[in-house]
Amino acid sequence: MLHHIVMWKIKDLGAEGNKAANIAQAKALLDACAHLVPGIERFDVATAQPGLEGTYDLVLNSSFTDRAALAAYQTHPSHVALKPFMRKVVLERQCMDFET
């Protein structure tokens, strides 16, 4: 199993003009990728919640059957299509992949 975790800090201003709108749009775009390719075992997209500790605004917690499934996801046209929006609104990005 290959785990792929990505966290983003979103700019206060960006493509949509405000942070909350940018977070909502980024979440919607990511949620639409949940079933793009075979081999996606888990695909959770979450936003920071008031009252809970968090240093990032948005997280993708996903698992894939193997490296080939992750590679297929990363190169899928629908996933590639969301990257221009993310580049406009992302302040910081952290990613970690690991196998279990």
Image (spheres, rainbow, N blue to C red):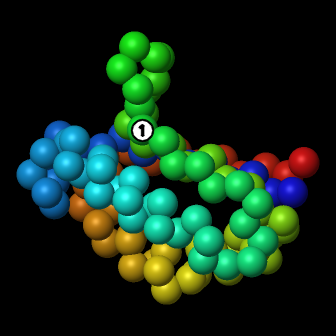
In depth, the one of 8 and 16 nearer the eye is 16
Q: Is residue 41 above or below residue 80?
A: above
Q: What element does badge 1 sit on?
A: strand
Residue 38, image x, y percentages? 74, 77
Residue behind mark 1:
47
Q: Which residue is drawn at the image coordinates 49% and 75% (left, top)?
A: 79
User: Farthest residue in the right direction?
Assistant: 100
Asked which quadrant contains residue 42, the reply is bottom right
Q: The N terminus appears in which quarter of the rendering?
A: bottom right
In the rendered structure, the answer to whether residue 50 lies left or right of residue 1 reads left
* Image label count: 1
Furthest toward the bottom, the residue is 77
Left/right placement of residue 82 relative to residue 3 reads left
Residue 14 picture location, percent across and down: 16, 54
Which quarter of the figure has residue 4? bottom right
**Which residue is at a point 40% across and 13% down the rendered structure image?**
51
Residue at 30 percent of width and 50 percent of height: 24
x and y, in percent, of residue 37 in the image? 67, 78
Q: Residues within 10 Å of mark 1 (few under 14, many from 20)?
A: some
Q: Which residue lies furthest to the top in this view?
A: 51
Q: Which of 92 and 38 is in front in this view?
A: 38
Type of amino acid under label 1: Thr
- Does residue 55 lie above or below 23 as drawn? above
Q: Position of residue 22 (x, y in %)?
A: 24, 51
- Drawn side of residue 72 relative to residue 75, left or right: right
